[in-house]
Amino acid sequence: MQRFSNKVVFISGAASGIGRETAVRLASEGASLLLCDIDEKGLGTTQKACEEQGAKTTIYRCDVSNYDECVNAIDACITHYGQLDVLCNIAGIAQMQHFTDISPADWHKILGVNLSSVFYLCQLAMPHLIKTKGNIVNMASSAGLVGQAYTSSYCATKAAVVNLSKSLAIEYSAQSVRVNALCPGNVKTPLASKLNIPEDIDKRLLGRMFPLIEAAQPCEIAAAVAYLSSDEARFITGAALPIDGAQTAG
Ligand SMILES: NC(=O)c1ccc[n+]([C@@H]2O[C@H](COP(=O)([O-])OP(=O)(O)OC[C@H]3O[C@@H](n4cnc5c(N)ncnc54)[C@H](O)[C@@H]3O)[C@@H](O)[C@H]2O)c1
């Protein structure tokens, strides 16, 4: 399949996990890529993997919680490729803490990386996406669809990403720009494996946070990003698609 021939895709969080797998998947389907992240070494590894698929790939160091850096990253994409067809907002961080232990600094950090970045990049990309009748895929989470203990700040950011995506889907539908959110449950990435779980949590409150089906591989989430951002999903906009082993089904 070459669903992304002549398409330019911007991916945040491309140095690791779901972002890296998405980059490689879209590279294998013909996309030209602008990959951004704060982790330059990881970006280099992703770039090499994408170039092995024959894709034109540009990397750009960018802290997506910083508005000016987002301006520069989108500018770099347009300067380099002259167009933008797909924006994938994948960069993110997670915190697992008791609610009363979340400091104002923790709160502002997670808001900046998980939510403000999505606002900034969607807004900056929109004029370019209107020109190409492009689309946006925002990486939310099952934690954006239901509440979870000990991850209240993360849940708040991801729920906001879901509703921001739906709002933009409606507002830009007349201009044929699609906007969707993906809501994965547990995925085997560094974000999940490095999560510091406080020792004194009440495990009964974790409920169905860890479903029976084995956690997803990042390539399985990348496959869904590829479908949603392709023309095959022309009639899908304003969706918040769970990929979570039934975690949020009932
Ligand atoms: N892994 C899971 O279980 C899971 C589940 C649901 C949703 N998600 C979401 O998927 C997305 C990708 O996470 P992942 O699991 O691949 O984690 P990951 O840690 O492997 O990748 C996250 C990437 O975001 C980058 N990043 C962090 N802060 C940044 C910043 N300020 N500016 C630019 N880049 C920054 C990191 O350097 C890293 O490359 C996140 O939004 C996460 O919330 C993950």
Image (tube, rainbow, N blue to C red):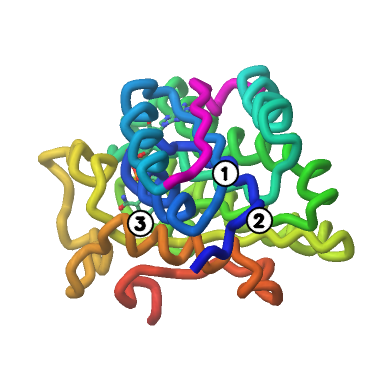
How many residues crowd around disc 2 within 10 Å: few (fewer than 14), some, or many (20 or more)?
many
Percent from the top left, x then y, of residue 142? 41, 62
Residue for point 44% across, 20% down: 105
Name the residue type under label 1: Ser
- Drawn side of residue 45 relative to residue 73, left or right: left
* Kind of residue at disc 2: Ser
Q: Residue at x 69, y 73 (%)?
A: 234
- Residue 107 appears at what percent x and percent y? 46, 30
Q: Position of residue 42 (x, y in %)?
A: 32, 29
Horizontal side, residue 33 vs residue 195: left or right: right
Mark 3 or mark 1: name the one nearer the start of the chain.
1
Q: Badge 1: few (under 14), some or many (20 or more) residues near its Cα, within 10 Å?
A: many
Residue 71 point in image, percent of width and height = 70, 24
Q: CA distance from mark 2 to mark 1?
A: 24 Å
Going by the picture, which residue comes out furthest to the left? Answer: 199
9 or 71: nearer the eye? 9
Task: Please give the label number shown on residue 165.
Answer: 2
Task: Single out the mark in the foreground, 3 or 2.
Answer: 2
Magenta segment, which residues? 54-67
Specify whether 235 is left or right of 34: right
Q: Which residue is mark 1?
A: 32
Residue underneath mark 3: 148
Amino acid carrying label 3: it is Gln
In the rendered structure, does residue 62 fall within the stretch colored magenta? yes
Instruction: Identify the residue at image location x=58%, y=50%.
Output: 161
Residue at 43% over, 38% down: 14
Q: Who is closer to the viewer here, 97 or 34?
A: 34
Q: Are marks 3 and 2 in contact (CB under 8 Å)?
A: no
Q: CA distance from mark 3 to mark 1?
A: 37 Å
Q: Residue furthest top?
A: 68
Q: Residue 233's quadrant in the figure?
A: bottom right
**As drawn, is 20 to the left or to the right of 9?**
left
